[in-house]
């Protein structure tokens, strides 16, 4: 793959799949980072953790803490306009965390320690320092190393896998209840924003010990596709740093005991204070969107919006599928069609504003498709799942996907209806 140079000259650089696009190192884009640099006179860069569309993430050592802490440093692109709202949310969250260090559910929300700005050749960048975590649950934490063959990964047998998923669901619910209690709506719940956490990794005592988990920095020179010599640019990094810890390695170090799991909810880029909902549409993935996000100009989002996304998350991790509850294609009208066929007619405030409804339904919300069922099951359990567990999950999900926001169960209410045994022995271990 090729990456265009940020200079006026049409130069193309060799591009690697696990590296952010070098063409994004330009005014308004990524900040060039090099191993060993110190930011804010405090955080020394040791390795790279990864990147996203709007930021790069680095493993850093806090030079002013005692004992030394290893943390995560997120450096946003200069053009990331949404970051100012994220910083507001993070500061609000940090105050709440400091004032309520033992509040229930806080152990399942990423702890943020610092935020600051840096100026560089590509602009001004917001930086966020948080605790060190492992990969997201997209890596399927029920996949474990085969002890007989270290190159082989096996899937947990069904009972242990279900137990892990149950604990994951219970923890995410407690984390969301914590956020709602401190007045924050997450707004972007999906598998990529649920991280695995290992205290053993987060509390390493030395750089040498840290290398056992993340290895040493994997650095390569920048090369041009035409094989001509690379000409350094202030907009580009001096060299390429590959992300440490591929997903399966990160999974392995975060899951020393597959029967135990600890998660952290992260990424507050779409979050907002419940008392001040955004006037613009949230960037939540369509598959996780509650109907009020689609009708954002009519109904503002709120805590119930998280509950809807949580239901989709529950469904996806239990079924081990990438197909969520209400997903036909990447089209809002098709999503709404599926919702109506599953849950019934939309509330009038949305129904009357939905222009495409007449193509699919009559005035009462009944489908025009001959022979089709109007109300479909909410939850299709995977084969092999215990019937009692499947019925329990179906009951819980139905409480979460009510079309009327006011009728959806709250996060604290969910804690009361989720069976206590879903947490296993982890309630007492939550600060481990």
Image (cartoon, rainbow, N blue to C red):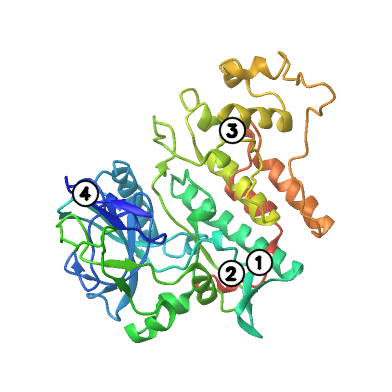
Mark 4 or mark 3, whichever is nearer to me: 4
Sequence order check, earlier mark of 4 and 3: 4
Q: Secondary structure at mark 1?
A: helix
Q: Is residue 397 left or right of residue 277?
A: right
Mark 3 or mark 2, whichever is nearer to me: 2
Sequence order check, earlier mark of 3 and 2: 2
Q: Secondary structure at mark 4?
A: loop
Q: Residues within 10 Å of mark 2 (few under 14, many from 20)?
A: many
Distance in Å between CA atoms under marks 4 and 1 = 46 Å
Q: Which residue matches tag 3?
A: 405
Checking the image for residue 261, the label placed there is: 2
Distance in Å between CA atoms under marks 3 and 2 = 31 Å
357 or 223, nearer to the observer: 223
Residue 285 against residue 168 in the figure, above or below:
above
What residue is drawn where x is 25% and y is 71%?
Answer: 35
Sequence order check, earlier mark of 2 and 1: 1
Q: Residues within 10 Å of mark 1 (few under 14, many from 20)?
A: many
Distance in Å between CA atoms under marks 2 and 4 = 43 Å
Q: Which residue matches tag 4?
A: 6
Q: Which residue matches tag 1?
A: 164
Q: Position of residue 149 (x, y in %)?
A: 63, 83
Q: Residues within 10 Å of mark 4 (few under 14, many from 20)?
A: some
């Amino acid at each position: 793959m090729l990456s265009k140079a940020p200079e006026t000259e049409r130069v193309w650089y060799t591009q690697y799949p696990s590296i952010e696009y070098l063409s994004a190192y330009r005014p308004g884009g990524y900040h060039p980072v090099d191993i060993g640099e110190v930011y804010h006179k405090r955080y020394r860069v040791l390795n790279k953790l990864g990147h996203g569309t709007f930021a790069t993430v680095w493993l850093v050592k806090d030079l002013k803490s005692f004992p030394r802490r290893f943390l995560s440093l997120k450096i946003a692109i200069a053009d990331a306009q949404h970051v100012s709202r994220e910083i507001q949310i993070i500061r609000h969250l940090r105050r709440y965390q400091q004032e309520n260090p033992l509040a229930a559910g806080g152990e399942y929300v990423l702890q943020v320690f610092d935020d600051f700005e840096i100026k560089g050749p590509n602009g001004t960048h917001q930086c966020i320092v948080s605790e060190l975590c492992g990969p997201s649950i997209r890596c399927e934490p029920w996949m474990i190393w085969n002890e007989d063959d270290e190159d082989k990964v096996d899937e947990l047998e069904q009972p242990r896998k279900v137990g892990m998923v149950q604990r994951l669901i219970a923890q995410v619910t407690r984390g969301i209840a914590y956020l709602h209690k401190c007045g924050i709506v997450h707004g972007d719940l999906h598998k990529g924003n649920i991280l695995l956490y290992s205290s053993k990794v987060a509390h390493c005592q030395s750089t040498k010990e840290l290398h056992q988990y993340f290895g040493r920095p994997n650095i390569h020179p920048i090369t041009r596709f035409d094989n001509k010599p690379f000409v350094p640019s202030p907009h580009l990094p001096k060299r390429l740093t590959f992300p440490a810890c591929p997903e399966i390695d990160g999974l392995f170090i975060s899951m020393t005991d597959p029967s135990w799991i600890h998660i952290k909810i992260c990424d507050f880029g779409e979050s907002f204070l419940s008392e001040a909902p955004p006037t613009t549409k949230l960037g939540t993935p369509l598959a996780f969107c509650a109907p009020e996000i689609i009708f954002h100009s009519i109904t503002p989002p709120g805590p119930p919006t998280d509950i809807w996304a949580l239901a989709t998350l529950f469904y996806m991790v239990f079924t081990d599928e990438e197909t969520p509850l209400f997903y036909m294609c990447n089209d809002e009208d098709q999503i709404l069609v599926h919702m109506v066929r599953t849950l019934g007619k939309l509330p009038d405030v949305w129904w009357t504003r939905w222009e495409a409804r007449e193509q699919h339904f009559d005035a009462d919300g009944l489908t025009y498709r001959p022979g089709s069922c109007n109300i479909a099951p909410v939850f299709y359990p995977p084969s092999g799942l215990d019937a009692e567990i499947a019925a329990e999950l179906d009951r819980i999900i139905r409480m979460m996907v009510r079309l009327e926001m006011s009728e959806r169960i709250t996060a604290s209410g969910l804690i009361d209806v989720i069976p206590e045994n879903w947490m296993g022995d982890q309630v007492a271990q939550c600060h481990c």
